[in-house]
Image (spheres, helix red, strand yellow):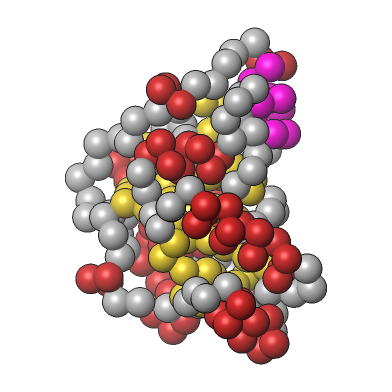
Amino acid sequence: MHLKDWPSAFFVTGTDTDIGKTVISAMLTKALNATYWKPIQAGLEEETDTEFVRRVTEFSDSHIKPERYRLNTPMSPHGAAEIDGVRIELEDFTLPNYETDYLVVEGAGGLLVPINGRDMIIDLVSYLELPVVLVARSTLGTLNHTFLSLEALRKRDIPVLGVVMNGPQHQSNYEAIQHYGDIDVLAEIEELETINPQSLQETFKKKF
């Protein structure tokens, strides 16, 4: 996918949690010289996703926007918010101002993760009116998760830029996602031994 084909703002989501979408977000942020924003962070004791992206891209704060919600407990946003005594509303979110050519917005968990008693992450994507990059694991179990995620996005008429497969190369799953999902696989990203600005940029140039 050429630089000119990337929209000015897009949402990076995943088919599940802990599949590497923050690494992909960092890669896209660095390679596109973009601004990064994670609207909801649940879990503050360890390095947050925003702190990780800042560290591995070595970008200044001008490229990193603060989260709208910082919740203490590492769990679904609706539960973490309840523990903290706050309520998340879609109307609380607006895209931050950014001076770069691109804005990368990263979600929390998968698309059907609740953020309150009514809305889920997918509703936030729709509310922000952003196209989606869907990050999926490359290994066993990815087909069902990927197709369900694509079906949910299409049901809400949310544009999907493509799928990024994360993990060891798996030709059968690659072909199945493109065929049955009727979607482009933008890249296959194997685990990076070292994550730093150079490796992020080099991998993007090689794989995307």
Residue 45 appears in view: no
Percent x, y of residue 69: 51, 26
Q: In the picture shown, does residue 91 fall above or below 107?
A: above
Please give the name of the residue rendered at 68% of the width and 17% of the height, measured from the top-left corner: 82
| Left or right of residue 6, residue 205 in this image | right
Q: Residue furthest bottom?
A: 171
Number of marks drawn: 0
Q: Residue furthest top?
A: 85
Task: Report the quarter where the C terminus lies.
Answer: bottom left
Q: Residue furthest right?
A: 140
Q: Nearer the viewer, residue 22 or 10?
A: 10
- The magenta segment is 71-82
Q: In the picture shown, does residue 113 fall above or below 169?
A: above
Percent x, y of residue 121: 56, 39
Percent x, y of residue 170: 69, 84
Please give the name of the residue rendered at 47% of the width and 81% of the height, measured from the top-left corner: 207
| Left or right of residue 7, residue 37 in this image | right
Percent x, y of residue 141: 78, 68
Please give the name of the residue rendered at 64% of the width and 33% of the height, measured from the top-left corner: 114
Q: Nearer the viewer, residue 163 or 103?
A: 163
Q: In the picture shown, does residue 69 fall above or below 171?
A: above
Q: Please identify the quarter of the rendering in which residue 175 is found.
A: bottom right
Task: Report the quarter where the N terminus lies.
Answer: bottom left
Q: Please identify the quarter of the rendering in which residue 140 is found.
A: bottom right
